[in-house]
Image (cartoon, rainbow, N blue to C red):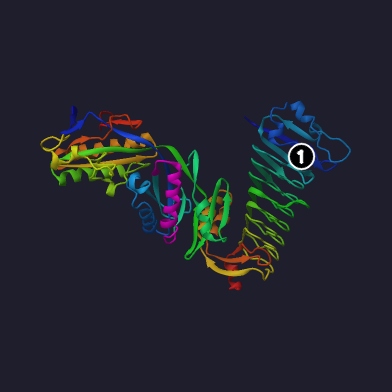
Amino acid sequence: MPGLTVKGVRIDDTFAEAFGMRATALVITADSARWARQAAVTMTGMATSVIGCGCEAGIDRELTSKQTPDGRPGVRVLLFAVSTAELQKQVQTRVGQCVLTSPGSACYSGLEGEESLRLGDGLRYFGDGWQISKRVGAKHFWRIPVMDGEFVCEATAGLTKKAVGGGNLLMIGRTAQTTRAAAEAAAAAIAKVPDVIAPFPGGIVRSGSKVGSKYKSVPASTNDAYCPTLRGAVKTALDNDAGSVLEIVIDGLTSDAVASAMRAGIAAIVKLGPKRGAMRISAGNYGGKLGPHHYYLRTLLP
Amino acid sequence: MTRLTLTLRQRPGQRLDLSPLVPHLLAGKSAHEIERIELQTTRRRVAVGELFRLRMGDAGQICIEGSCERLDYVGREMTGGELLVEGDVGIQAGRLMTGGRLTVRGNAGPWAASGMKSGMFEIAGAAGDRLAGPLPGEISGMRGGIVVVRGNAGERAGDRMRRGTIIVEGDAGPYAGARMIAGTLIALGAAGPLPGFLLKRGTIVLGSGCGALSPTFVDCGVHQLVGNRFMAAMIESYSKSAARFMRLPLRRLAGDMAVLGKGEIFLGKFGDEYS
């Protein structure tokens, strides 16, 4: 694939193809940063891909006690799903099972959206009649008595329909170690970008997939064109020096946020250089016909 | 734009109905039209022009100067904008307000903020009896918005309140928060006897204790609740002292068990006697 080279790293002239998604943001607080983080990690667990998890979720950033509604340390998490109904279901289940249950937690909307999802409005029934509704100004929240005191939960959370899921970068390196170093550097850079998450483990995915399979019942299967061990056996997308490929998938509340994250990721990979990191950067797409958002790598160079 | 200012020339010979002098009713009117608005409450007619010196300006920001307690219904059914009153006001100031900001730099008479629905009402001095309460025959009192009284409040502050927030920085009279359906009443000074009489739901916060407390309130222990911290953040801009108090560990009394019993009274260090 023709491309250009920046500081020794080859960048394919291709684009990442992404899709419109529904998303919400929640602010989870607790008595300490450790417990806010714990609730956030638990509620964003097993949320790597909408295909098998119902939603994609992750931690956007940590908040100091000055940045949260109740003056305690907090974490902002983002959740993405393909439909409003599915997102509603995921928010309800995950907050109900993972945040409500976490010691000292409270949960607030982290987004001013054009529409809203039920948050405390659904969970309040846990209070069995002892729940207390409070409305101050534009804020409406519920106090639900629990065994360690009260679970405070805002009635609704903002929803955005302008979210984008599936922005991505492919890092191709000589060895598994150097490729992972590049992916780690990119994931660390992307974690600093606001309003985006990289939902896979540590932000990185090693099992990129293609649509379809030789087996009738399997909808997606390994992306053989990028498997280095099949380099000689299949119609490969890899050069002869490629030993390992990793991918970063990015979901963002806006298209601009996804573009910023990809730009930050590319900059980090280029900074690491081809010897210690990846020697080539590419991106995944479906020919441009499926997703409305196209992020051309040449427009995102450092 | 400058404010539209009305300066009272002298103490009026009769009580006046100030309800026409709110931003949305004065919008688009000329000085001449405003001066011809009648404000009498007796058979003797008096118009704005005879009573006030008018300085035209933006009707969205009205200032009434030299006010006295004979001016009733100030800011009644106000929907938006700002209304500032320098001096005292009479009965039912801010009644049925649905928006905007009403400020009284003086004392307010009985039924201030009666049945208020939304908006912000600040009284720099004291408020009379039945602050935010319903008129006889009405089912509920205040239904939303925020009322801040820097001084004391009379009897039955927050009577039959259903939603909204009242902050009294001074003392509250007897029966504070009587018959409350829901909402929040904070009285930082000493409250009179029987606060929360027949309280169904809602929160009463008493910063300096109260007179006799009904035995139908039951002790739920001392707690530093997250909900109160959140509430504190919400009211910080209206009353720093109320916000500070809400962040303390407070004794929670549930009641009134004579009725629904889903309400609560929070007491500070004065609550120790109930343990």
Residue B22's spot in the image, x, y percent?
A: 71, 37
Nearer-the-camera pick, B214 or B90 = B214
Which residue does the numbered mark 1 point to in the structure image? B18
Q: Which residue occupies 70% across, 29% down? A: B56
Total marks shown come to 1
Q: Chain of mark 1?
A: B
**Seen in the image, is B71 located left or right of residue A41?**
right
Quarter the C terminus of chain B occupies: bottom right
Instruction: Let me know if residue A110 appears in the view.
Output: no
User: Can residue B162 be seen from the camera position used here?
Assistant: yes
x and y, in percent, of residue A171 in the image: 21, 39
Residue A243, horizontal then vertical, whole percent: 13, 42
Which three-letter amino acid code belongs to the residue tagged 1? Leu
Give the side of residue A256 with respect to residue B152, left or right: left
Quadrant position of the N terminus of chain B in the picture = top right
Disc 1: CA contacts within 10 A as few (<14), some (14-19) or many (>=20): many
> For the point 32% across and 40% down, which residue is it?
A250
Relative depth, front residue between A223 and B92: A223
Q: Is residue A186 above or below residue B138?
A: above
Q: Main secondary structure of the magenta part?
A: helix
The residue tagged with tag 1: helix, strand or loop?
loop
- Look at 86% across and 35% down and name the residue there: B45
Residue toward you, B52 or A140: A140
Q: Tell me where residue A81 appears, x and y as whole percent.
A: 39, 43
- Write the start and end of the magenta stretch as one range: A80-104
Q: Is residue A112 magenta?
A: no
The single residue placed furthest to the front in the displayed view is: A216
Instruction: Report which quarter residue B41 is drawn in.
Output: top right
Q: Is residue B66 above or below residue B191?
A: above
